[in-house]
Image (cartoon, rainbow, N blue to C red):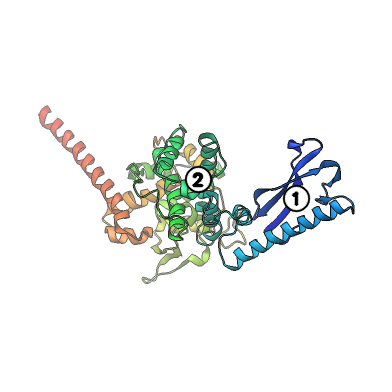
């Protein structure tokens, strides 16, 4: 009884509850792949039920009564679906069921706001962010099943206790760091805030909860480490490619996503008549204009006739971030670098070692990185100041050592 690509009703007997040859009759409502089971408060003799056609067999008076009842239920459910769609309200299987039963439809479920958010925000969120929301949804589902013994919960039941219980549940995963826990809670808060703004709930359960991130020092390569990678000859093609991508990012400040999408159209003459990158950050869509340093230009030229990019607009061969970071570990080993080398370290290296440490004003660095707030860039400035302090301390110790020897 499918009525559209997003809505359907299926009638079935719950054979697990057969008594005296009769089983309870149910309607399964499906909207966008999500289901809700509706008991129709009738029992049907199993031998009289056509499971393929989902109707009572035969032409008897009982068959006519039951099948007319099924048509009526299907019509009511479809009418509810149309009304909700026409009013541009959230349409979900659970809401259609509640409407049919006369239950207050303002009692939205947690799954309703998650579904609404993931459907309506799809056009504004990049794929990586969408995947993060799906992961948060997965942990919420596990939490509800393991700790609350349920598959769902009404939004009106969400409170401060629910939030701290969910936080404790997440911290029970040894591999999950504190900041990752906070990221999941932040995504949950954004969805609940959306529900609050749409007046699905009258109180915000997050009002007293503070999202607290641990401050972590951003890893970057110093000049010696960057030079070690640049000068290292790698005779394995895959490692040589990764080295080039990493060094290119160190001299442009581009992220993994920005490097992978970089095309020939993004390379143009700047205001000074030299080659620049004119693009926008994949993550934030903020426009960026970056003058190309000679080392970056050399790497671009190297891949002009590369077999993996021949006939394509993109400058570099495509490789997954996961593989790229895995190969960077190998490069770190052969170069004797003890730091946890990831592709994002290149962006931090550009901000600290390549630009700020060489006297480029922080306002300029902020523009090059595509930051919308100067405070974001100032994190790197503090790192540089710390490094200067350490260098001066080392110099002081050396000078003191010479004085003592004299």
**Residue lying furthest top in this view?**
405
Residue identifier under label 1: 11
- Comparing 277 with 39, the one in front is 39
Residue identifier under label 2: 136
Locate residue 344 relative to residue 360 in the image: left or right.
Answer: right
Location of residue 346 in the rendering, given as x and y in whole percent from the top left corner: 41, 48
Location of residue 267 in the rendering, given as x and y in whole percent from the top left corner: 47, 65
| Location of residue 72 by image quarter | bottom right
Residue 114 appears in the rendering: yes
Nearer to us of marks 1 and 2 is 1
Mark 2 nearby-residue class (10 Å; few <14, some 14–19, many ≥20): many
- 291 over 341 or under it: above or below: below
Q: Secondary structure at mark 2?
A: helix
Q: CA distance from mark 1 to mark 2?
A: 33 Å
| Location of residue 45 by image quarter | top right
Location of residue 260 in the rendering, given as x and y in whole percent from the top left corner: 52, 55
Residue 327 appears in the rendering: no
Location of residue 307 in the rendering, given as x and y in whole percent from the top left corner: 61, 54
Q: Which mark is residue 134?
A: none
**Residue lying furthest right in this view?**
59
Locate residue 42 relative to residue 267 in the image: left or right.
Answer: right
In what quadrant of the picture does the N terminus appear? Answer: bottom right
Locate residue 96 relative to residue 217 in the image: left or right.
Answer: right
Mark 1 nearby-residue class (10 Å; few <14, some 14–19, many ≥20): many
* First along the sequence among labels 1 and 2: 1
> Is the residue under label 2 in contact with that under label 1 (CB below 8 Å)?
no
């Amino acid at each position: 009884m499918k009525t559209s690509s997003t809505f359907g009703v299926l009638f079935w007997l719950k054979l697990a509850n057969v008594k005296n040859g009769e089983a309870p009759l149910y309607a399964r409502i499906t909207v966008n792949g999500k289901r809700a089971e509706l008991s129709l408060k009738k029992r049907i003799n199993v031998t009289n039920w056509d499971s393929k056609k989902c109707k009572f067999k035969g032409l008897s008076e009982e068959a006519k009564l039951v099948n007319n009842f099924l048509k009526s239920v299907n019509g009511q459910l479809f009418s509810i679906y149309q009304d909700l769609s026409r009013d541009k309200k959230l349409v979900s299987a659970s809401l259609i069921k509640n409407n049919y039963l006369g239950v207050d439809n303002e009692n939205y479920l947690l799954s309703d706001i998650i579904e609404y958010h993931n459907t309506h925000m799809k056009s504004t969120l990049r794929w990586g962010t969408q995947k993060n929301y799906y992961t948060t949804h997965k942990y919420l589902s596990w939490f509800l099943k393991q700790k609350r013994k349920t598959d769902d919960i009404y939004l009106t039941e969400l409170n401060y206790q629910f939030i701290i219980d969910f936080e404790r549940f997440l911290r029970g995963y040894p591999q999950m760091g504190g900041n990752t826990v906070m990221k999941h809670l932040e995504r949950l808060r954004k969805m609940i805030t959306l529900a609050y703004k749409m007046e699905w709930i009258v109180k915000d359960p997050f009002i007293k909860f503070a999202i607290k991130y641990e401050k972590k020092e951003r890893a970057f390569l110093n000049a010696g480490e960057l030079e070690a990678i640049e000068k290292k000859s790698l005779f394995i093609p895959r490692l040589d490619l990764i080295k080039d991508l990493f060094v290119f990012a160190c001299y442009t400040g581009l992220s993994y996503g920005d490097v992978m999408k970089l095309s020939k159209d993004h390379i143009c003459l700047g205001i000074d008549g030299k080659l620049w990158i004119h693009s926008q950050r994949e993550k934030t869509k903020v426009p960026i204009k970056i003058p190309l340093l000679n080392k970056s230009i050399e790497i671009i030229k190297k891949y002009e006739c590369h077999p993996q990019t021949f006939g394509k607009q993109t400058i570099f061969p495509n490789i997954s971030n996961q593989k790229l970071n895995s190969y960077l570990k190998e490069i770190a080993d052969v170069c004797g670098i003890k730091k946890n080398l990831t592709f994002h370290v290149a962006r931090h290296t550009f901000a600290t070692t390549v630009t700020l440490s060489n006297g480029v004003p922080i306002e300029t660095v902020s523009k090059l990185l595509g930051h919308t707030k100067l405070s974001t860039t100032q994190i790197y400035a503090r790192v540089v100041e710390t490094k200067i302090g350490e260098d001066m301390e080392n110099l002081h110790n050396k000078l003191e050592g010479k004085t003592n020897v004299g």
